[in-house]
Image: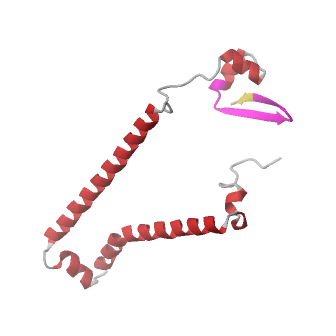
Amino acid sequence: MEKPGQGPPHPEVFVKDEVRSPLRRFAEDTITVVCWGIYLYLLLPLFTLVLWVFGVQTIYDQIIGEKGYEELARLLQNGGLTVIVIFLIVSGWTYYNYLWFLRRGERRGGQVRISSDVEMSGMLGTDSAALEEIRKARRLEIRVDGPLYRISAKE
């Protein structure tokens, strides 16, 4: 029997490199390098701020130097505008996907009953009172013995 607790986060097939094809390894490594590059590029303003705090004058001259704080304010306005545009694009895409799947019938507006309580209690081999107890329980214990299994509520 396995030890209790959380198991490994990934199945072994995804962890072992010899299982993955060379094309898949190349694609995953390329995507990883590109994403790290984008991440580091997005951290450049923070890096330049740290350099500016430590007195690197060229950074000071480029950001604040000739035009003063007006240039810094313009830079912050453009950055805020960029964040708003990205937010609107992502929100629009999310809403479009919601409508697309709603039209296809893959979004359900509430809980969908798959089967009745009588059918579920028959399938689980229990009565309706035990089924209600199972439904309200925060933890369940499932025992599997060959083709048979037993579910019970735990407190």
Taking depth in this image into account, of 46 and 99 the one nearest to the observer is 99
**Magenta residues, as a range?**
135-151
Residue 28, above or below 81? below
* 113 left or right of 119 in image: left
In this picture the colour scheme is secondary structure
Taking depth in this image into account, of 124 and 154 the one nearest to the observer is 124
Where residue 62 appears, as percent x and y from the top left, is 22, 79
Q: What residue is at 70 percent from the left and 52 percent from the top?
A: 7
* 132 left or right of 56 in image: right
Quadrant position of residue 24: bottom right
Residue 62, above or below 37? below
Q: What residue is at 67 percent from the left and 65 percent from the top?
A: 21
Where residue 86 appears, as percent x and y from the top left, is 32, 54
The outermost residue toward the right is: 146
The prevailing secondary structure element of the residues shown in magenta is strand
If the image is split into quadrants, where does the C terminus sit? top right
Where residue 129 appears, as percent x and y from the top left, is 70, 16
Q: What residue is at 43 percent from the left and 67 percent from the top?
A: 39
